[in-house]
Image: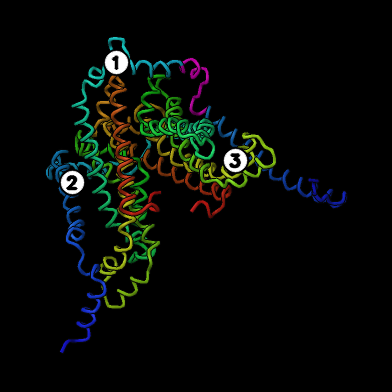
Amino acid sequence: MTSPQEVDTRELRARYPDVFDRPALARLAMPAMIVAALAVLVYGLVDLDFSPSRFFNGLSQLGWISLMMIPPDPGSSLPIYLKALGETLSIALLGTTLAALFALPVSLLAARNIVPSNILRFPVRRFLDSIRGVDTLIWALVWINVVGLGPFAGVLAIAVSDFGAFGKLFSEAIEGADQKQVEGIRASGGSPLHEIRFGLLPQVLPVIAGQVLYFIESNTRSATIIGIVGAGGIGLQLAEQIRVLEWQKVSFLILMILVAVAAIDFISGKLRFAIIGRRAVA
Amino acid sequence: MTLAVSILPEQQLAVLNAAYRQAVSRRRLRLLLGVVVFAAALALAGFGAEVNLRTLFTYFGNFVSYFDRILTLDSGQRVWTDIGEWFWGLRKWLRMLGETLLISYVGTLIGATFALCLNFFAAENTSPSPWLRFVVRRLLEFARTVPGIVFALIFVIAFGLGPMAGVLAIAIHSTGALGKLFSEIVENADMKPVEGIRSTGASWLSCMRFAIVPQVTAGYASYALLRFEINVREASVMGFVGAGGIGQELVVAIRKFYYSDVSAILLTIIVTVFIIDISTGWLRGRLFGKEART
């Protein structure tokens, strides 16, 4: 006599054959993908000169470095560091604002509901994409060649690379806007410019403001690193102290960066709540 | 057709108008205040960042002519007239690009593995104990907030010059970023399967394995692919501090004013990033449907 469980299983098997007998290809796909991923990983480790001895030597070095970082101590250069931090924050704020100002008109050109023609929109989009494809650090190097070392190059670098990102984000926000209000303006006899000003911008601006604030936040991080290539701010100090192995100062600078980023996060979070409300942030 | 707009009596209208004006003027005042504060902050920032508009105007020509120069060969011709000369080092650059891709792949995979191990401790609903959650969360926050290139700078000193430092830097940064995203997915997971499995007497580990993981794998993979995309960009600049990849070539070309090389390397990087973006986007669309593509 068969147990009730067996009967159940048999019946289920008969009823849902594709659940119990999946084709071999589907069953093998997952393990095959995992094996392939691991093979590439191993190849990568070999190709990139990973070796256990090097790894553990490095780890013990790292351990010594961390020990030497304690306690964090700015020495006598605290005022310089504070000034550098101020510079970093200034770079983030100015760069983001500049980028937003320039990106707004361009994003209109890249939005489907403003410029219906594919031929016109395509080059604008690709242009923005290629700007985004280049990292902020590379832009910083280019601007250093143009305006010389210093924070001003950093501002321009952040502005250019964010210009690409904002162009895309803004145009997406504009495409997501409700068309009914635009149609309403048109129906009451507004010109295309009126449609944008009274139909579109009031819907889009809060979204854009939220994004700009978020970028100021994330640019505080970017601004800390562009100093490494010489574009001013706290990154410059950090890179210098790492090169001369002043570990206590390094850890102090890293702490400063962490605290500053946390503070900016907090402030801009509060501001975003105030501007667009809790719902849109989450 | 006649217009049929009903107009309210004068007194009623006056009251409404006054209320409207008051409401609007209060909003305008707040906006104005905000604008003033923002402008003040900008001015302060401009002072702090040594912004000099004169410099910009004098040198803006340089910016334009810089692009003119990087598009000119040594012979004075435009780069696209002689592709072979322009991309003279293509073989070497492609090898460096391959290294860059490997760095980001290995870094992402290691980072994702660590994030996978840590995220259950960081998620509100699955963490075994509050203090463990606190510690893991701070750890992830630290890994996420310190920029990858700072880790790279330190690792280059500890592990020596080369791609290993870049891989580890990317791995740590990815652990921080993915750990947070992963734990958010776990927090959104349905807890009923966990209860079901716990009621059979299963351990915490089995609960995670059989109740949570099946729900969240798709989200994990999607975020890991997205991270890979970001890491390719990041790996392309790791070479700036000596941590391997194409960045090394680029920084040399920029610093030594090998103009046509700069444009050639930039172009190869941009094309690679495009290809990676498009193919991971396609892959994510294939694997997880359209809604996962955010």
Inspect the image, locate mark 3, and give the three-letter code of the amino acid beneath it: Leu
Q: Is residue A246 magenta?
A: no
Under circle 3, the secondary element is: helix
Cα separation, mark 3 vs mark 2, equals 48 Å
Crowding at mark 1 (Cα within 10 Å: few <14, some 14-19, many 20+): few
Residue, x 21% and y 35% (percent of image)?
B98
Q: Nearer the viewer, residue A94 or B294?
A: B294
Quarter of the image where one finds residue A225: top left
In the picture of the structure, the residue carrying the numbered disc 2 is: A41
Label 3 vs 2, first from the N-terminus: 2
Inspect the image, locate mark 2, and give the three-letter code of the amino acid beneath it: Leu
Cα separation, mark 1 vs mark 3, equals 45 Å
Quarter of the image where one finds residue B43: top right
Q: Nearer the viewer, residue B178 or B158?
A: B178
Q: Is residue A118 left or right of residue B256?
A: right
Q: Position of residue B222 (x, y in %)?
A: 33, 51
Residue placed furthest toward the bottom: A1
In the picture of the structure, the residue carrying the numbered disc 3 is: A201
Q: Position of residue A138 (x, y in %)?
A: 35, 28
Mark 1 against mark 3, which lies toward the viewer? Answer: 1
Is any atom of residue A14 visible in this view? Answer: yes
Mark 2 against mark 1, which lies toward the viewer? Answer: 1
Q: Is residue B45 left or right of residue B83?
A: right
Q: Chain of mark 2?
A: A
The N terminus of chain A, quarter of image:
bottom left
Residue range of the region highlighted in magenta in the rendering: B47-60
Inspect the image, locate mark 1, and give the three-letter code of the amino acid beneath it: Thr
Q: Is residue B53 magenta?
A: yes
Q: Chain of mark 3?
A: A
